[in-house]
Image (tube, rainbow, N blue to C red):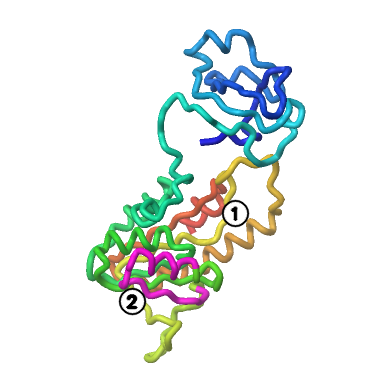
């Protein structure tokens, strides 16, 4: 994959935009931002392994100031692996769906079974939903809810592309979708309806991607935690006795993880 500019720690003193460059990794983390490449980097493979050649997109000074974008466009990789995100062919799009390992684990830990009734409470854009439906062999009922119309449409398109007929898309707020009424209506569910529930709720995303700063305030984080706990409360009521609830986030904030689990 190409090298983002924010990942460039050290760079040669005379590098200009358009220059061909070699890329090495500082395994021992001995360099700091703005350092020059030491002469030993070209001969010490154990400490500075070479991973490929590329073309610099910025001059040295500008490279070190960048807060985003590609810094080095890789042209020759040491390891001849295909960048999966670059596969745009129809065959590739219809053959596999890219997900991070934690996303895959959430669906695996849920252990969905064919024929079950399952609820994905915050489903869009649909990566975990389609994985769950696949593990169900497209048999049973998988209710997939989200409160964003735009993201919900993306999920519908994804399910249609993969021909997953067991998915029931729902535009609703899952925090308020439980009802004790004998006739709860189209966007409410009776308690103890689902065999398994995945709650991968909205979160702060702290630690998900490298950032120089995070503009979220303490009140923002507490607000997210409050909403997550409302979702958890609803999930506990919707789950059948001895059912399985998997709660996951994409943040390293303990207030949204361990604290919520303890709550």
Tell me the distance, in whole angstroms, between the alpha carbons under discs 2 and 1. 29 Å
Q: Give the magenta-colored segment's residue range.
A: 154-173
Where does the image place residue 233, in percent across and percent down from the top left?
47, 69
In depth, the one of 12 and 54 nearer the eye is 54
Q: Compared with residue 165, is residue 89 higher up or lower down, i.e. above or below?
A: above
Total labels drawn: 2
In depth, the one of 239 and 116 nearer the eye is 116
Where does the image place residue 87, in percent across and percent down from the top left?
44, 47
Quadrant in the picture for residue 11: top right
Could you say whether the residue bearing mark 2 is in a helix, strand or loop?
Answer: loop
Q: Compared with residue 105, is residue 153 higher up or lower down, i.e. above or below?
A: below
Side of 134 where 144 appears, left or right: right
The residue lying at 57 percent from left, 66 percent from top is: 227
Other residues around mark 1 within 10 Å, as few (<14) / some (14–19) / many (≥20) = some
Mark 2 or mark 1, earlier in chain: 2
The residue lying at 69 percent from left, 58 percent from top is: 219
Where does the image place residue 194, in percent across and percent down from the top left?
33, 72
The residue lying at 51 percent from left, 24 percent from top is: 52
Other residues around mark 2 within 10 Å, as few (<14) / some (14–19) / many (≥20) = some
Where does the image place residue 203, in percent across and percent down from the top left?
56, 57
Mark drawn on residue 102: none
The residue lying at 53 percent from left, 30 percent from top is: 75
Could you say whether the residue bearing mark 1 is in a helix, strand or loop?
Answer: loop
Q: Compared with residue 95, is residue 232 higher up or lower down, i.e. above or below?
A: below
Q: Is residue 91 magenta?
A: no
Viewer-nearest of discs 2 and 1: 1
Find disc 2 in the rendering and name its residue. Answer: 193
Q: Residue furthest bottom?
A: 183
Q: Is residue 158 magenta?
A: yes
Find disc 1 in the rendering and name its residue. Answer: 204
Quadrant in the picture for residue 191: bottom left
């Amino acid at each position: 994959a190409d090298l983002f500019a924010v990942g460039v720690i050290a760079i040669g003193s005379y590098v200009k935009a358009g220059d061909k460059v070699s890329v090495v990794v500082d395994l021992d983390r001995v360099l700091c931002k703005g350092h020059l490449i030491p002469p030993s980097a070209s001969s010490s493979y154990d400490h500075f392994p070479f991973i490929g050649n590329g073309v610099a997109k910025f001059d040295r000074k500008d490279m070190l100031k960048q807060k985003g974008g590609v810094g080095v466009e890789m042209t020759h990789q040491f390891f001849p692996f295909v960048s999966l995100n670059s596969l745009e062919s129809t065959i590739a799009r219809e053959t596999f769906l890219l997900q991070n390992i934690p996303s895959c684990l959430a669906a695996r830990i849920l252990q969905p079974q064919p024929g079950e009734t399952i609820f994905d409470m915050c489903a869009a854009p649909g990566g975990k939903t389609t994985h769950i439906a696949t593990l169900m062999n497209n048999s049973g009922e998988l209710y997939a809810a989200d409160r964003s119309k735009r993201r919900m449409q993306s999920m519908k398109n994804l399910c249609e592309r993969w021909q997953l007929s067991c998915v029931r898309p729902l535009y609703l707020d899952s925090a308020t979708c439980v009802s004790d009424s004998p006739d709860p209506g189209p966007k409410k569910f009776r308690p103890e309806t689902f065999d398994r529930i995945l709650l991968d709720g909205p979160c702060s995303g702290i630690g998900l991607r490298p950032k120089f700063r995070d503009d979220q305030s303490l009140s923002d984080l507490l607000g997210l935690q409050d909403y997550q706990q409302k979702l958890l409360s609803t999930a506990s009521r919707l789950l059948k006795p001895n059912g399985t609830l998997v709660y996951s986030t994409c943040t390293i904030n303990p207030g949204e993880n361990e604290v919520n689990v303890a709550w």
